[in-house]
Image (cartoon, rainbow, N blue to C red):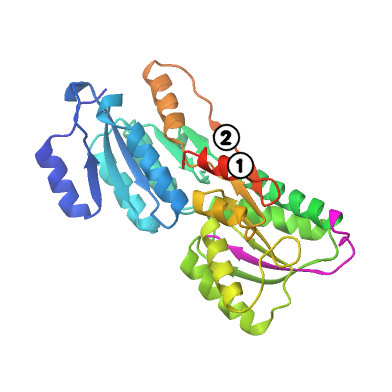
Amino acid sequence: MKKSVCAAAVCAMLMLSGCLSAEKPASDVSEENLILVGFSQVGAESEWRVANTENMKATFSEKNGYELIFNDAQQKQENQIKAIRTFIQQDVDYIVFSPKVETGWNSILKEAKDAGIPVIVTDRYIEAEDEGLYTAYIGSNFRQEGEKAVAWLESLLQKQGRTNDTINIVHIQGTMESSAQIGRTAALDEGVVRNANWHIIERQCGDFTRAKALEVMEAILEKTKDIDVVYCENDGEALGAIDAMEKAGLKCNAEDGVIVISFDATRLGLEYCLAGKIALSVECNPLQGPYVHDIIQKLERGEKVEREKYIDETQFDCFTITQKMIDSRPY
């Protein structure tokens, strides 16, 4: 284990980068024995992302034997690359990051490999020309999440006797080229191929935010209100789309209105599901810190680790969700 970076050096680095901060709760653990982790978070664009950040900070605390250097990249890949380079200069023990997009990481990861620093990728995948450029990936199977949503929609429409009806779908995508967007989009595209009566009438990027989804949905509604399904790639987008549709006089309801499908299963999203406005929310679990901790502890002991670890996830629909389910959720 490397020793913690001295305070003066850290302060100098922080002033230069403008967006790094060290998480240092009180602890009885000797500073010299702490594992130094640099974590670059893609941003704070959603409730899911905030929950993910809070979980990572809680996991990598001094009482758990860590010193955390945290970076909010503010949705910019260039900020993440700068942060990772700073982590390398600070000689951290481990680099953890949740990438904005899948590509463009090879050069900086080569720098980390040359420095002998293990890299753990969380939440979203990356494409690397050499698998040895990162140690492990921990996160969700986004393609599988999308497949769950599409299968649920197929089942619902079959129960409603609408298998031969024209189904007009509005698709609001997440941040383009992120693995969540790629996987969830691919699953819907497969569903459209499989169901000849499904038609994507509009496809726009909502960038995983409520505000952007509201904006794009308002623009879509100016062209058409003949919509059967709105497939949003996270809860924030679903809330924005619902805001726009209700303002336009449309009803969001799986039985006799627009069927809204979403991902993440945040508390607010599930409250909308309980109210019947979101028909289905497929869980994307943000509590990834303990999984990263387990990998780091194995590496500290010199043990082999799984290269890919998918987190267990479920789904919630408006027909079966209860307040008790929501109250029992940790996020």
Asked where in the image residue 205 lies, by quadrant, the reply is: bottom right
Residue 96 versus residue 159: which sits nearer the camera?
A: 159
Residue designated by label 2: 310
Q: Is residue 299 above or below residue 95?
A: above
Q: Residue at x 59, y 70 (%)?
A: 204
Q: Amino acid at mark 1?
A: Asn
Asked where in the image residue 23 lies, by quadrant, the reply is: top left
Does residue 172 show up magenta in the picture? yes
Residue 329 versus residue 179: which sits nearer the camera?
A: 329
Asked where in the image residue 191 lies, by quadrant, the reply is: bottom right
Between the C-alphas of marks 1 and 2, the distance is 6 Å
- Give, as a single range, the part of the protein colored magenta: 159-174
Q: Can see residue 59? A: yes
Q: Is residue 26 above or below residue 156?
A: above
* Position in image of residue 290 (x %, y %): 43, 30
Dots 1 and 2: beta carbons under 8 Å? Answer: yes
Q: Residue at x 50, y 54 (%)?
A: 268
For label 2, the SS is strand
Q: Which mark is residue 159?
A: none
Residue designated by label 1: 141
Q: Amino acid at mark 2?
A: Tyr
* Position in image of residue 185 (x %, y %): 65, 57
Looking at this view, name the residue that lies furthest to the bottom.
222
For label 1, the SS is loop
Return the disc, 1 or 2, that comes first in the chain's sequence: 1
